[in-house]
Image (cartoon, rainbow, N blue to C red):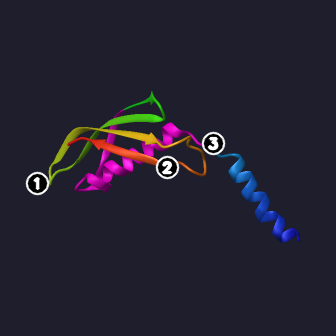
Amino acid sequence: MKRMMLPAMIAMLALGGCNFNPAEYAERLCRNNIRERLIDPTGARFTHPLSSYTGGNRYTASWMVTSRNRMGGMSRHRWSCSVVYEGEPNLFYAPHTVTVFGS
C-alpha cells in the first residue's frame, strides 16, 4: 500500500507545481517550427526576442536568427511566428495552429 502511495504523491507534487504559461509555450512552439525550416538547426542562435499577446488566444513572437546558409556561411534573418490556440489552453490540452514568417 505504501509503495503505491509514494508515486501518486510525487505525481501530485510535480503537477501541482506546474503552471501552464501560454506565452512561453507559444515561444517554444515557434522556435521548434523555425528550427524545422533551417538548414542547420543545431547551430542556430536566437537573439533579440520580441513576443506579445495580440488577443483572441493569439500570440506572436520574433527573433533575429543566426544560422548556416547553403554555402556554409552564417547569415542573420528576422523570423516571426504566430500561434493561435483553438479554445482555452491549459496544462493538459492546448490545440494550436502555428504560422511561421521568415527567410
Residue 19 image label: 3
- Which region of the structure is painted magenta? 20-49
- Give me the residue at 74% from left, 52% from top: 13
- Majority SS type along the magenta span: helix
Which numbered mark, 3 or 2, is in the foreground of this view?
Answer: 2
- Asked whether residue 17 is drawn in magenta, I would say no
Q: Position of residue 6 (x, y in %)?
A: 81, 64
| Place of residue 93 in the rendered image (x, y in percent of width and height, measured from the top left) | 57, 51
Establish if 55 lies above or below 71. Answer: above
Identify the residue under disc 2. Answer: 95
Judged from this view, the residue extending furthest toward the left is: 71
Rendered residue at 32%/52% (across/down): 35
Quadrant assignment, res 50: top left
Most distant residue in the right direction: 1
**Residue placed at 88% from the left, 68% from the top?**
2
Cα–Cα span, label 2 and label 1? 37 Å
